[in-house]
């Protein structure tokens, strides 16, 4: 309608159309600003497109840093990081996200398929101390229920699991027990690592077991509960060194002082010594 009367001023046109003058004035100014914003946006998008084509492997953060360097040299306004990301998505110039390959982990082995050998279980239990979180790797001989080793560390890792396992195996070797071992654990990343599996292959085989299985990890879980509720939590250690000392005391107490119902109320270390003597006699 305004185009049909180009010679009329804006105020005259407002009177003829019975529209407030300020509304027409603001609409015209907003339209001019909208066109300017559109042009600036197109210029920024073109700049982002050129930079993305120049650096095809860069993500939006790296491109934003490059654009900011260029804008500092020219004194122009740099597009924001969010605008760079949205522009790359709109122009389909975002670099492809690398496909994460999930490492294949062995499944839980049924109890009837467990290989022959001396079963040794390993697991880690968490303790929140005053000086930070600590973990205790517990290694258990399943047949005699003897705690072979307790290794206290700051964080879980494959190397710590290997160190704990080898410490327990050394205790068996000191007694002359050289049987092939079936190392049982849960599916933690420290136990499913190549480093831990290689250490298990040196002495036998590794098997992943569940707590709910008969003869599975529930045996060691009960030892962990005993360690926590009958020993550590009563003493309330606050430092990692204190926890390590208490774990050493617990190992002695559990193996030689506390009778075990599964063993006919005998002591785990006594049973382990009997096994060692029988193997020597054989």
Image (spheres, rainbow, N blue to C red):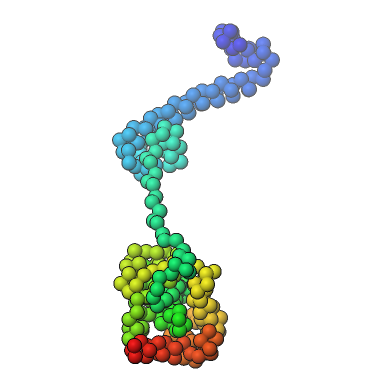
State the image quarter where residue 31 is shown.
Answer: top right
Estimate the x, y position of residue 25 in percent, counting from the top left: 59, 21
Q: Name the residue: 34% across, 64% down.
A: 194
Residue 28 showing in the rendered view? yes
Residue 59 coordinates in the image, percent (x, y):
37, 43
Horizontally, residue 71 falls left or right of residue 210, namely left
* Image vertical order of residue 250 relative to residue 184, above or below: below
Viewer-proximal residue among 132 and 151: 151
Question: Residue sitting at 41 percent across and 90 percent down?
Answer: 274
Tell me if 212 is positioned left or right of 280 in this view.
right
Position of 254 relative to 6 (above/below): below
Q: Quadrant of the C terminus?
A: bottom left
Q: Residue furthest front?
A: 282
- Which quadrant holds residue 51? top left
Q: Is residue 61 left or right of residue 3?
A: left
Quadrant where the image shows the N terminus: top right
In front of the other: 221 or 281: 281
Q: Position of residue 166 (x, y in %)?
A: 34, 77
- Which image quarter: residue 141? bottom left
Along the line of sight, which residue is nearer the eye, 253 or 277? 277
Specify the farthest residue to the right: 18
Q: Residue at x 47, y 82 (%)?
A: 145
The front one of 206 and 246 is 206
- Can residue 150 be seen here? The reply is no
Residue occupying image coordinates x 43% and y 39%: 85
């Amino acid at each position: 309608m305004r185009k049909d009367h180009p010679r009329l001023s804006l105020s005259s046109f407002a009177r003829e159309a019975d529209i407030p003058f300020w509304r027409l004035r603001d609409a015209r100014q907003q339209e001019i600003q909208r066109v300017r914003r559109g042009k600036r946006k197109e210029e920024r998008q073109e700049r982002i497109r050129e930079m993305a084509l120049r650096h095809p492997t860069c993500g939006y953060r790296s491109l934003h840093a490059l654009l900011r360097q260029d804008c500092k040299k020219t004194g122009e306004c740099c597009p924001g990081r969010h605008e760079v990301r949205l522009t790359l998505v709109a122009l389909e110039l975002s670099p492809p996200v690398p496909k994460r390959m999930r490492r294949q982990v062995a499944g839980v082995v049924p109890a009837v398929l467990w290989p022959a050998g001396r079963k040794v279980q390993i697991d880690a239990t968490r303790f929140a101390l005053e000086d930070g979180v600590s973990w205790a790797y517990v290694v258990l001989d399943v047949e005699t229920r003897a705690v072979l080793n307790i290794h206290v560390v700051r964080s879980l890792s494959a190397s710590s699991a290997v160190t704990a396992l080898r410490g327990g195996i050394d205790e068996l070797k000191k007694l002359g027990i050289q049987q092939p071992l079936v190392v049982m654990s849960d599916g933690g990343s420290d136990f499913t690592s190549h480093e831990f599996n290689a250490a298990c292959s040196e002495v036998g085989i590794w098997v992943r077991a569940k707590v709910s299985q008969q003869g599975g990890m529930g045996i060691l879980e009960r030892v962990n509960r005993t360690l926590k509720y009958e020993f550590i939590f009563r003493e309330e250690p606050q430092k990692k060194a204190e926890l390590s000392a208490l774990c050493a005391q617990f190992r002695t107490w559990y193996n030689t002082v506390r009778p075990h119902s599964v063993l006919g109320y005998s002591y785990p270390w006594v049973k382990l010594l009997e096994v060692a003597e029988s193997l020597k006699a054989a």
